[in-house]
Amino acid sequence: MIKTDILIIGAGPTGLFMVFEAGLLKMRCHIIDALPQPGGQLAELYPKKPIFDIPGFPSIMAGELVDNLMEQIKQFEPGFTLNEVAETIEKLEDGTFIVTGSRGTKHHAKAVAIAGGLGSFEPRKPELENLEKFEENGVEYFIRDPELFRDKKVVIAGGGDSALDWSIFLTDVASEVTLVHRRNEFRGALDSVEKLRELKNLGKVNLITPAEVTELHGESTLTALTIEHEGEKQFIETDFFVPLFGLSPKLGPIANWGLEIEKNAIKVNNSLDYQTNISGIYAVGDINTYPGKLKLILCGFHEATLACQSIYQRLNPGKKFILKYTTVSGVDGFDGSRKEAEKAVVKTID
């Protein structure tokens, strides 16, 4: 039996940052994740993808962000149960929880925080006749290592942030980049759309809209594809086809825990602490939903911070929390008590 203050389900960026916030309040954390390594989607799907909306970093690779978060929480010595799915949960009479993993590992926690990102997921695939034939033989649903496309011809399909970002990034890697989207308008960030159009004007990317990939060609590997554009068919030679139509999320066993679910996400009370309908179970990051929800990593950081404040009060009833800044108190002496806060101030003055 693994005992901890907070069991965090999901080792993505939000779950990892929650360890840091909990550590500042002297709460111990253990993380369980279905993947074999920490980092969630950032590590598994696109470690080499640049991220642009992390405060203080104009751009940072997804894998580098994971490494930084792991370094940040190392001082608090969290535990990890990896390559195991959180399957069942039992709330005991004292308000604590027993969470059992798919391999039988039992975790006893005073509070549970679900930070599972999109949950389990699979790529949304285009309806093409011989798609499976070329999977991993020219058709890729994720870009884990951009070097795979070095000096190759690449056709990307999609209109969201991933399609835009990778089209921009690969212009410095691939010999030829073509982006195909079925509409003239894009769902991604306006800045990315403007960058893409600039690259198109410079001849660094081929932009075909409104259009759709309708056929794949080749023997054992992909060699070309057909694009239907404004009623006409266009034959394009390519080495890779990367359809980026998003992910189909699934909550998995968590969906059977009695939590209030809306559109495959967990409803939480965002006016207070991101707690679910079950007292003591919180949901933070992309896996939760509430009015005005934004699925951004920095929003997950904010939610994890407030959830930790609530869990502190749950574990320390009647103990008044005094908010302090790490710029004043540092990390080692950070605690929620008034006595410790006064000590920190005295030490700083001395």
Image (spheres, rainbow, N blue to C red):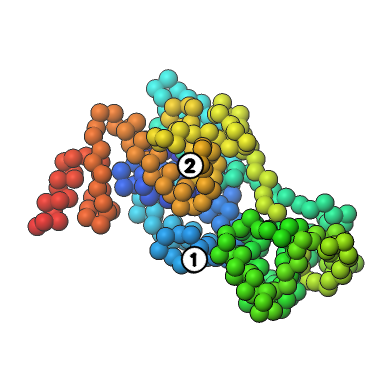
Q: Residue at x 62, y 37 (%)?
A: 264
Q: Residue at x 66, y 61 (%)?
A: 163
In the rendered image, the quadrant that contains the C terminus is bottom left
SS at badge 2: loop
Q: Which residue is mark 2?
A: 284
Q: Is residue 1 visible?
A: no
Q: Residue furthest top?
A: 93
Please state if 9 lies on the left or on the right of 330 as rendered.
Answer: right
Q: Position of residue 215 (x, y in %)?
A: 87, 61
Neighbours of disc 2 within 10 Å: few (<14), some (14-19), many (20+): many
Residue 103 quadrant: top right
Residue type at tag 2: Val
Task: Tell me, for residue 336, which label it has, or none.
Answer: none
Q: Position of residue 196 (x, y in %)?
A: 63, 69
Q: Residue at x 60, y 43 (%)?
A: 119
SS at badge 1: strand
Residue type at tag 1: Ile
Q: Which residue is mark 1?
A: 60
Q: Is residue 176 visible?
A: yes
Dot placed on the residue nearer the N-terminal end, 2 or 1: 1
Q: Is 198 in front, or is 246? A: 198
Residue 317 quadrant: top left
- Distance, label 2 to label 1, CA atoms, is 22 Å
Do the CB atoms of the residues marked 2 and 1 lie less than 8 Å apart? Answer: no
